[in-house]
Amino acid sequence: MKKKTPGYWALNVVSILLAVICLGPLVWALFVSLQHEGKQIKSVLDWFTPPYTLQNYPDIIANSGVPTWLINSLIIAVLVTCLTVIFSAMAAYALAKLKFKGSNAFFLYFLLGILVPGEATIVPLFITVNNLHLIDSYAGMILPSIAGSMNLIIMVTFFRGLPDELLEAAKIDGAGEVRIFFQVALPLSKTIISTVCIFAFVGSWNNYLWPLLCAMSENLFTLPIGIPTLAGTYTVDYVVPLTASMVASLPMIIIYIIFEKQIVAGITSGAVKG
Amino acid sequence: MSKARRRKTFLVALAFILPFFILYTVFTIWPVIQGFYVSLHKWGLMGKQDFIGFDNYAKFIGDKNFWGALWHTTFFTLITTPMLVVTAMVLAMLANRATKIKRGLRVIYYLPSILSVSVASFIAKYTFAPYTGLLNGVLHSLGILPQDAELQWMQDPNLVWFTISLMTVWWTIGFPMLLYLSALQDISTDIYEAASIDGATKTQQLFRIVLPLLKPTTWLVFLLQMIGCFKVFGQIYLITGGGPASSTRPLIQYIYENAFEKNNMGYAASMSYVLFGILLVFSLGQQLLQRRGEDK
């Protein structure tokens, strides 16, 4: 490396300043969640000064729907992720590796979906799900989020790149198509599966518009739907809503920090190759 | 391949495709068709009431609220997209410099993007709140804002769009930044070395080499962000509720209100078709661009 110029340090300062702006509101929310309720706030520094307490966390977990919403969010996100991966992988494998009449027609049909934004079909989707009597049920929350064109295309592209020889070898050994898929093709596609997992999980975890319509009763709320209901009850108080926000986000933040490299690689490769 | 074998492959393939095919048809394609059918009817939450042809579409002309909502969405897209493109590029360049803090910067710049829309909106709502909120508090402490003055970030019609835009950039900048970052990493270091040997300054390198090489990424980010901005709903709904006095209500919120509060699903479906049409043009543009990029 060459010697470090004033420009180098200036850009470092700018980088850090921008990082502080990115992180500031989150760190502040964390400190607010550690304050005693009803503390007098005379200047912004009072939000950051002790005495701290951890009592808000058990309080909110015991006295609000947050644990229920958290569990709902988890169940729905996990099921959406598993079903998305298995159904997309099966369909993609058939389209990419099994030679059969009509595979191109199917592929073109599945491509149409990238042009359909979910936001623009939310009203007829509600009517459809309502006709199936799935409004206000787990199935209604889960099923519409599974078959996405983007995930399918990513997987088709991947399977097409898988050398046929690997699969042929298994075929000669007498394995059927189903066994080849589960025992040869799937284990080879760990990276692409993790990409699709990230997309599916994060998409479901953060989904707002659909659960807002589909979940009618509070015991089916997910975190994104439940959290805002806390604002109405406690309009002046910052501590309860921001503690709830922290409870909702800390698991994701921790997972993100641990798996940052994989997540970033997954998102980038999915977006660029998709 | 024998006939029996071919037949078996065909059946296996169908079985593999079937679950995806059913879910995709019922929940993605069918609503598009159903939506058009609904838009030709007077349709309430309980179901079909009357066939009225294109009356729902004709209703747009006189509906000031529809044009208002469409304009809010458009205006939001016009101001936010450029902010997102420029900020994403700058952050990616800063996080791509050879420094010790490189990795930390990437983690932090992306961090707000993992928050769900309600948490991000909640945090923004309290950050922008007057009197005890974070932003006014910081401005007071730094002496930028006099102690007895408060900026009404979410109530003042002159500030509210800036607030929503700023929050959106903070919350969604991660993804476009990653796209730029991966494009920057694809630029070979040889090019910079060759340029330095030829005597090009850093500024010349930026404008003559880096920006032109980033052009395809910029187009991609621009179109993706435009599509994303046009779908705006959650953060506005949660931060301002579309206020003050409906002055920030976006199109999706107006669709939502018509369908689920005013019991007018037919009209909501016809407005959804307008949204669909606009987004279709954007997405076709993006697909064309990506195909062209891959052919090169």
Image: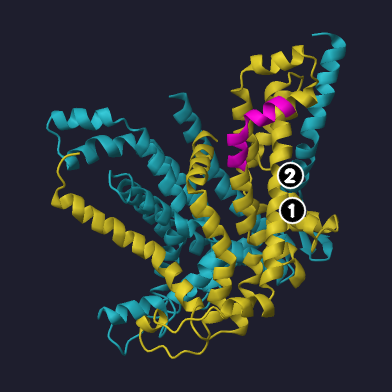
Chain colours: A yellow, B cyan
Q: CA distance from mark 1 to mark 2?
A: 9 Å
* Residue at the outermost top position: B2
For the magenta stretch, what is the residue range? A183-196
Q: Main secondary structure of the magenta part?
A: helix
Give the quarter of the figure containing the N terminus of chain A: top left
Q: Badges 1 and 2: C-beta atoms under 8 Å apart?
A: yes
Viewer-nearest of labels 1 and 2? 2
Residue type, numbered disc 1: Ile
Give whichever of discs 1 and 2 has the lower sequence position.
Answer: 2
Q: Please indicate whether residue B218 sits to the left or right of residue B205 in the image.
A: right
| Chain where mark 1 sits | A
User: Which residue carries the number 2 mark?
Assistant: A83
> Going 42% across and 61% down the picture, which residue do you hit?
B170
Measuring from the top left, give residue A146's x and y in whole percent: 71, 46
| Chain where mark 2 sits | A
B121 shown above or below A253 = below
> Going 15% across and 39% down the picture, which residue do you hit?
B201
User: Which residue carries the number 1 mark?
Assistant: A142
